[in-house]
């Protein structure tokens, strides 16, 4: 009997601990803010505009929608691609939004929301407009005389190291600065996402994205909101917000505005 009582006590203790650990919604309400981790270096997802000091992009709008739904303010917490996962797992923020690719590696150690931007993301290149005809395939990039600039810690670096071993890889810490580095001839190629390439070609007339309509094989993906594992209630809530946005058409309109999705849905 004594052993049985100890077992019951242990189970109750485990339940109480799980409730303490899985309390993001309660913490956010008590704090009055939702802490959002973001790199702020990824146009058109999350970009900290140095002129205004404000975050811009689809993830900035999604952040505001989530915060408004909870009745709290946003507290942005800067992070970097190399430290994003560690910062998330250390509890430095409640969620992270900055064009985060949904992949198995992240899903093993963290939670990821339902997808958005489906069918719109894939690896491609930015180069100078004068060089656009030189690069038609991965083979054209994978040469010793091709200088490829990458930001550390993200999927762009992983793709370059896995597929371009013969090229000269240049690691540049500031992702948002790489397109200008390419335009000024400091490197030849930036490995990037299709949506980022399109956005920069519109901003910078010296740049081109010659392969944007044919992302590299096996690189298509969607984005998701990153969370800590273990709080199913919070994950359900974030997915609920996305589902409501998808249902009433607002998510599609944001994807049209920022990601170039064509408005193929006729609503009645």
Image: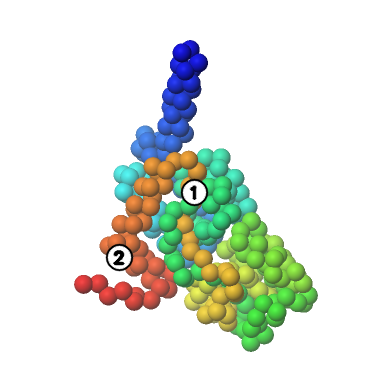
Outermost top residue: 2
- As drawn, is 139 to the left or to the right of 72? right
Give the farthest residue toward the left: 268
Q: Is residue 159 above or below residue 139?
A: above
Q: Is residue 186 above or below residue 174?
A: below
Indicate the quadrant where residue 137 lies: bottom right
Q: Position of residue 189 (x, y in %)?
A: 66, 74
Disc nearest the viewer among 1 and 2: 1
Pointer 2 residue: 249
| Quadrant the C terminus occupies | bottom left
Asked if residue 231 lies left or right of residue 180, the reply is left
Decide which of tag 1 and tag 2 comes sooner along the chain: 1
- The residue located at (47%, 70%) in the rendering is 120
Residue 247 percent location from the top left of the image: 29, 62
In the image shown, does 146 or 242 lie closer to the viewer?
Answer: 242
The colour mode here is rainbow
Q: Residue at x 47, y 27 (%)?
A: 14
Residue at 42% over, 73% down: 260
Q: Residue at x 56, y 49 (%)?
A: 108
Q: In screen coordinates, is 20 left or right of 206?
A: left
Helix, strand, or loop for circle 2? loop
Is residue 130 at least partly visible in the picture? no
Assess disc 2: are there few (<14), some (14-19) or many (≥20) residues with their C-alpha within 10 Å of its C-alpha.
few
Q: Please rate how many residues cluster around mark 1, counting C-alpha atoms within 10 Å: few if below 14, some from 14 to 19, many from 20.
A: many
Residue linked to disc 1: 111
Residue 203: x and y, percent? 50, 74
> Can I make out residue 214 in this image?
yes
Q: Secondary structure at mark 1?
A: strand
Residues at marks 1 and 2, CA–CA distance in whole angstroms: 25 Å
Q: Which mark is residue 205?
A: none
Q: Is residue 142 above or below residue 101?
A: below
Which residue extends farthest front?
Answer: 1
């Amino acid at each position: 009997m004594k052993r049985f009582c100890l077992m019951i006590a242990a189970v109750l203790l485990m339940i109480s601990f799980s409730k303490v650990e899985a309390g993001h919604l309660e913490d956010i309400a008590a704090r009055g803010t939702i802490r959002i981790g973001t790199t702020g270096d990824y146009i058109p997802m999350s970009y900290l505009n140095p002129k205004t000091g404000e975050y811009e992009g689809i993830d900035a709008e999604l952040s505001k929608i989530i915060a408004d739904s909870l009745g709290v303010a946003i507290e942005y917490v800067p992070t970097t691609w190399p430290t994003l996962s560690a910062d998330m797992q250390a509890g430095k923020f409640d969620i992270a939004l900055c064009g985060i690719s949904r992949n198995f590696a992240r899903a093993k150690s963290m939670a990821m929301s339902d997808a958005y931007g489906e069918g719109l993301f894939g690896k491609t290149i930015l180069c100078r407009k004068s060089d656009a005809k030189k690069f038609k395939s991965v083979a054209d990039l994978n040469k010793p005389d091709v200088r490829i600039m990458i930001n550390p810690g993200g999927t762009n670096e992983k793709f370059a190291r896995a597929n371009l071993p013969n090229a000269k890889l240049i690691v540049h810490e500031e992702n948002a600065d790489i397109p200008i580095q390419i335009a000024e001839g400091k490197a030849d190629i930036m490995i990037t996402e299709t949506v980022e390439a399109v956005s920069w070609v519109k901003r910078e007339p010296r740049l081109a994205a010659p392969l944007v309509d044919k992302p590299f094989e096996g690189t298509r993906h969607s984005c998701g909101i990153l969370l800590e594992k273990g709080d199913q209630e919070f994950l359900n809530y974030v997915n609920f917000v996305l589902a409501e946005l998808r249902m009433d058409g607002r998510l599609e309109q944001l994807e049209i505005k920022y990601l170039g999705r064509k408005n193929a849905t006729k609503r009645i």
